[in-house]
Image (spheres, coloured by chain):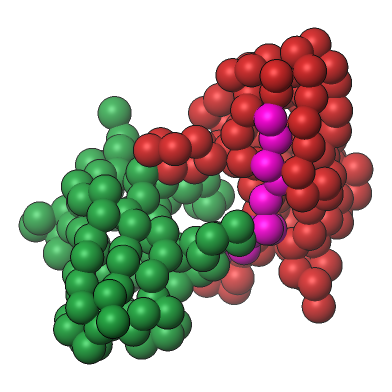
Chain colours: A red, B green
Amino acid sequence: NAGVTQTPKFQVLKTGQSMTLQCAQDMNHNSMYWYRQDPGMGLRLIYYSASEGTTDKGEVPNGYNVSRLNKREFSLRLESAAPSQTSVYFCASSHRDRVGQETQYFGPGTRLLVL
Amino acid sequence: AQSVAQPEDQVNVAEGNPLTVKCTYSVSGNPYLFWYVQYPNRGLQFLLKYITGDNLVKGSYGFEAEFNKSQTSFHLKKPSALVSDSALYFCAVSPPQWGGYNKLIFGAGTRLAVHP
């Protein structure tokens, strides 16, 4: 059971380039999330997907798009990277239990540097 | 605005001493409360959560957290710190009005340094 996996681990982009961050989970979770982590700011939600086929904006969605490809995979795309998108990106997944409670489980992160 | 505050950027404690990492929140209603830990170059790991019931919640690695509704606090504690506890700790809150989905508001994090 690998949990939540993310690729790549590290990426350097030039301003204006595009790329897709990949995330997959093998825990059969319904909900998936993308966060960015910046120094002194904790984690901020970019997009989330409550279930396969649905996506919604989080706190900081500008400059990003997402695709919930299937129940396992949730990708994050930067169409035209900017230096302000230099950050560490975390994917997470969660499942609602019988009493309606959820706990999020996180991947190892992708460190992105935009020059 | 809904927010989570971790007032200390860093907490230093000697190995074997008790530790406390503070968290207060500003959220209406009865939120769900979480603590996560992040080791260097790793993702966040779930430590514990408070949903309802006993105000003292026990979690992984000997950690516990005390919920105080009147002070809107959820401080993380451990009776005897280990050097291996050194990491970045995040408090998070899930407001109940977000339709039950687990959208989390994170604090900025507190770095715990345990010295031998």
Please tell me which residue is depicted at 68% across the width and 42% down the height of the picture: A111
Q: In the picture, which quadrant includes the N terminus of chain B?
A: top left
In this figure, what is the number of numbered marks? 0
Instruction: Name, please, the residue furthest toward the left.
Output: B70
* Residue A101 showing in the rendered view: no
Please tell me which residue is depicted at 56% across the width and 25% down the height of the picture: A60
B101, above or below B62, in the image: above
Front position in the image: A20 or B51: A20
Front position in the image: A55 or B58: B58
Please tell me which residue is depicted at 30% across the width and 44% down the height of the picture: B4
Query: Relative to B70, is B13 on the left or the right?
Result: right
A101, above or below A112, in the image: below
Instruction: Name, please, the residue furthest toward the front.
Output: B116
Q: Which residues are magenta?
A: A101-113
Q: Position of residue B66 (x, y in %)?
A: 21, 72
Please tell me which residue is depicted at 20% across the width and 78% down the height of the picture: B14
Q: In the picture, which quadrant includes the C terminus of chain B?
A: bottom left
Q: Position of residue B71 (x, y in %)?
A: 10, 55
* Residue A106 showing in the rendered view: yes
Q: Quadrant of residue A13?
A: top right
B14, above or below B108, in the image: below
Q: Quadrant of residue A75?
A: top right
Q: Position of residue A82 (x, y in %)?
A: 68, 15
Instruction: Name, please, the residue furthest toward the right.
Output: A69
Q: Position of residue A21 (x, y in %)?
A: 81, 39
Is residue A82 magenta-colored? no
Query: Relative to B88, is A44 on the left or the right?
Result: right
